Image (spheres, rainbow, N blue to C red):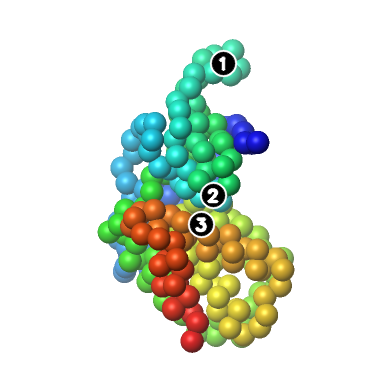
């Protein structure tokens, strides 16, 4: 049975996402990253949209419902992977961080992040509780660059030690979010994206 979530708040702006400018990476490799999701626009039925921490969904309907005594328009977004349905007020799209699918021309910046291996990363690993908070914040931002940063760091840690159950769960989530969106944006099979990601880290 489908679950329905009504979302009236959020953490990130859409489609101009909040970004962390890691060591000047954004200016160097991705000067237009502030337009990750494209120009601000209304979604229509059939459009794909990305919802933070949940992934890619399809706008299945736009419905008018009464909320707090007033009629409001809602996007009915079905998440592709989980079949979860999320009701997002049309006026709250930017607030909750829902954005357009990444453009093909911007995917190379995601791979650049994955390939940027940091010196000493394997030796200076912060506590899991601290990293868990940081990872969750990045994933919930809805920004694919930050999701890529989480994926990269966990792959690098994996090279040095066996990941804990919690670390494995976060790695799997970050990989799923990144792979699904890039595969849909490029119109190719997810297995091809997984293979490309694995090739970066598996020696």
Q: Residue at x 41, y 72 (%)?
A: 196
Q: Quadrant of the N terminus?
A: top right
Number of other residues with Cα within 10 Å of mark 2, as a class: few under 14, some 14 to 19, many 20 or more: few
Where residue 194 appears, x then y in whole percent? 46, 68
Q: Secondary structure at mark 3?
A: helix
Determine which of the numbered discs, if any, sits on residue 177 in the image: 3
Q: Secondary structure at mark 1?
A: strand
Residue 44 vertical position relative to residue 131 in the rendered view, above or below: above
Q: Residue at x 43, y 43 (%)?
A: 49
From the image, state whether disc 1 or disc 3 is nearer to you: 3
Which is more toward the observer, 17 or 45? 45
The quarter of the picture where residue 133 lies is bottom right
Residue under numbered circle 2? 81
Residue under numbered circle 1? 66
State the separation of the CA atoms marked 1 and 2.
Answer: 29 Å
Lower sequence index among marks 3 and 2 = 2
From the image, state whether disc 1 or disc 2 is nearer to you: 2
Question: Residue placed farthest to the top in the image?
Answer: 69
Where residue 83 appears, x then y in whole percent? 56, 42
Question: Residue placed farthest to the left in the image?
Answer: 105
**Is residue 202 visible in the rendered structure shown here?**
yes
State the separation of the CA atoms marked 3 and 2.
Answer: 9 Å
State the separation of the CA atoms marked 1 and 3.
Answer: 32 Å
Lower sequence index among marks 1 and 2 = 1
Residue 98 vertical position relative to residue 68 in the rendered view, above or below: below
Where residue 12 appears, x then y in whole percent? 50, 46
Where residue 40 appears, x then y in whole percent? 34, 39
Which is more toward the observer, 128 or 166? 166
From the image, state whether disc 3 or disc 2 is nearer to you: 2
Q: Residue at x 55, y 75 (%)?
A: 155
């Amino acid at each position: 049975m489908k679950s329905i979530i009504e979302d009236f708040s959020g953490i990130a702006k859409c489609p101009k996402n909040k970004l962390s400018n890691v060591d000047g990476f954004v200016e160097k490799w991705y000067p237009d990253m502030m337009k990750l999701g494209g120009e601000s626009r209304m979604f229509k039925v059939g459009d794909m949209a990305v919802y933070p921490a949940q992934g890619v969904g399809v706008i299945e309907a736009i419905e008018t419902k009464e909320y707090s005594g007033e009629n409001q328009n809602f996007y009915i977004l079905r998440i592709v992977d989980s079949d979860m349905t999320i009701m997002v007020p049309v006026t709250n799209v930017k607030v909750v961080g829902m954005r357009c699918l990444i453009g093909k021309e911007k995917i190379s910046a995601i791979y650049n992040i994955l390939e940027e291996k940091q010196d000493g990363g394997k030796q200076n690993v912060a506590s899991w509780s601290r990293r868990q908070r940081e990872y969750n914040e990045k994933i919930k931002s809805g920004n694919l660059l930050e999701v890529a940063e989480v994926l990269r760091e966990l792959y690098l840690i994996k090279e040095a030690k066996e990941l804990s159950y919690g670390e494995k769960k976060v790695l799997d989530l970050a990989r799923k979010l990144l792979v699904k969106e890039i595969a849909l944006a490029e119109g190719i099979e997810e297995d091809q994206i997984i293979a490309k990601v694995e090739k970066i880290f598996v020696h």
